[in-house]
Image (spheres, rainbow, N blue to C red):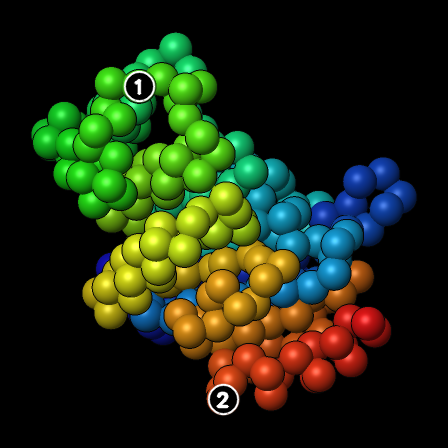
Amino acid sequence: MPSSDGLVLEARGLQRSFGRVRVLRDVDLTLAAGEALAVAGPNGAGKTTLLRLLAGLMRPTAGEVRVLGRRLTRGGGDARRALGLVSHQSLLYDDLTLLENLVFAARLYGLPDPREAAVAALESAGLSGRAGDSPRRLSRGLAQRAAIARALLHGPRVLLLDEPFTALDAASAERLREELRRRLAEGLGLVVVTHHLSEVWAVATRVAVLVEGRWASDEPRAGPLEGFLPRYHGLIGA
């Protein structure tokens, strides 16, 4: 269930430094059920660091993250189970088949029938015919589809995606957009980090621009992308 104020994800005062280098500076973020936030910005803006903090893969220097009203901590199992993540690493093991990888993940999430959930996830991703393959035998595009299937396997309430359309062909990209639309209609909260707003514009409900570790903008997605791009380039100084 969402928190009492309707938020599925909340970050307050997030800061992250690496030595003397400050990568994120007092970042606040709220996300309600059914919202899709596209996060854009130049290289080095802190986008991937933000996503890692939201996923609990990295501790903030200051601030906190809450998922469904629960503070995200290393031991916070309930909050972590509500998250799905697609990052630059597939989180798939090369010494297991695709089916074995998803069965293993389903067991970690405590799903009642891990094999049934894994089979359904592969079918939804169009990967049933590759169930017996090792991830190392897959093309980059197929590996990305498998990583997405793993992230969606347990029906997360919050989905965090870092460049999810990388290496996907046009048909696979549209399949992903349709899946995201369906899950958003069911109450998913979505954060997508992207260098290519065109890939997520039709799905996003909000667009935020991160520059030098701070929000330069966070606003509802309105109108065509072509109308937003001049403002975006102005915000990032391009």
Q: Quadrant of the N terminus?
A: bottom left
Q: Label for residue 2?
A: none
Check disc 1 and report the residue beneath it: 133
Nearer to us in this view, 167 or 11: 167
Q: What residue type is labelled 2?
A: Gly
Q: Nearer the viewer, mark 2 or mark 1?
A: 1
Q: Quadrant of the C terminus?
A: bottom right
Question: At 56% across and 38% down in the image, what residue appears?
Answer: 88
Answer with the quarter of the image where residue 216 lies: bottom right
Q: Is mark 2 on a helix, strand or loop?
A: loop
Question: Taking the image as drawn, is residue 218 in sight?
Answer: yes
Question: At 56% across and 57% down in the image, what residue appears?
Answer: 193
| Image coordinates for residue 171, horizontal then vertical, percent | 34, 54
Q: What residue type is labelled 1?
A: Asp
Distance of label 2 from label 1 (alpha carbons): 43 Å
Check disc 2 and report the residue beneath it: 223
| Image coordinates for residue 20, horizontal then vertical, percent | 89, 44
| Image coordinates for residue 89, horizontal then vertical, percent | 53, 32
